[in-house]
Amino acid sequence: MSSIFSESILVLECAGSAQKQGCTLNARRRSGTLARRAAARTRPSQARVWHDGDVSISSPQRLGDRFPSASQPTTPAQHRRYDRLVVAARAMLESGGDEALQMKELSTRADVALSTVYRYFPSKQWLILAVAVHRRRELASDPSRPTFRDGPASERAAGWLLENFRRELAEPLFFDAVRRAGYTAGRETRGVIEQLRDGFLRHLIEDAGPFAAEQIPLLDLIVEVADQVSSRSGAGLITPREARFRLLAVCALLDLGSEAIDGLATAAVTSG
């Protein structure tokens, strides 16, 4: 069996795993919601931003003004404490991974009472995922971030995903901590995980769009496969070259014509 053929089988296995987790190609069921997200990329941001020196954290647009924490900050002083906690936790994660992130040490570094730390973040998983959400918003608001506007949709999406994968390789401690937090997260943090995933998809659409309406459901599948690729790469199950191949291969789905995409959507319905 050739190397390329073997890798193609693994891509299909990865896509199949994503589909088992609930990601189907049923365009009739999901395209409306995702198309609205795509259209939203042209509207001005309605998120509020709180500032504390060089620190600014935006509230998530899709989930209203809710922060990824158990208790919501409301006053300016509470926002400042929340900001200090997230920024200090991020620095600890980037330098030493999740083992370096200790709640008592974080309390000292951020100058926030330990009881307040736990009020916002009842567990380390809560905190790590909140830092990941903050990091994703920060990247999305950076005017110097790379965007991909030239070429066909498959090339633009692949370019964006490869750039994201490059960041993961450059900061393995941080991204390994986020992956582990996602694996061990309890039911109470599922909303934060969904927030992360939704932000990933929205920023892909914003930075590599525009996409045709029939391509939007495929982007949902591509994000699911990209998550699987990231997990397998982080666990050392595939090499960086193999990971890049999978990302390129799944993005090639965007080269399908509208009739082929409709056929897949129909097959997803009738095969059930």
Image (cartoon, helix red, strand yellow):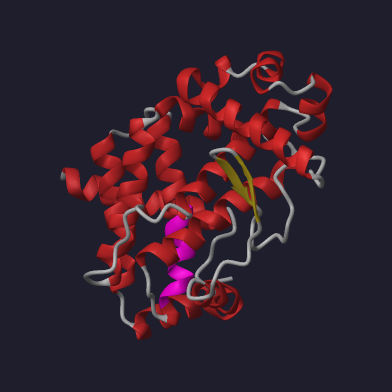
Of residues 42 and 158, the one drawn nearer to the viewer in this rendering: 42
Instruction: Give coordinates of residue 239: x percent, y percent.
Output: 28, 33
Q: Image check: 143 left or right of 88? A: left
Whether residue 173 is visible = yes
Numbered marks: total: 0
Of residues 271 and 150, the one drawn nearer to the viewer in this rendering: 150
Which of the 4 quarters of the picture holds residue 82? top right
Q: Is residue 63 above or below residue 245?
A: below
User: Magenta stretch: residue 169 in it?
Assistant: no
Whether residue 16 is visible = no
Q: Is residue 65 above or below residue 31?
A: above
Question: Furthest-left residue in view?
Answer: 2
| Location of the C terminus (image quadrant) | bottom right
Residue found at x 49% / y 17%: 96
Residue found at x 52% / y 25%: 91
| Location of the N terminus (image quadrant) | top left
Q: Is residue 48 above or below residue 67?
A: below
Which of the 4 quarters of the picture holds residue 111? top right
Of residues 177 and 271, the one drawn nearer to the viewer in this rendering: 177
Residue found at x 41% / y 31%: 234
Of residues 140 and 271, the one drawn nearer to the viewer in this rendering: 140
Secondary structure mostly seen in the magenta stretch: helix
**Magenta segment range?**
215-224
Q: Is residue 256 above or below residue 113?
A: below
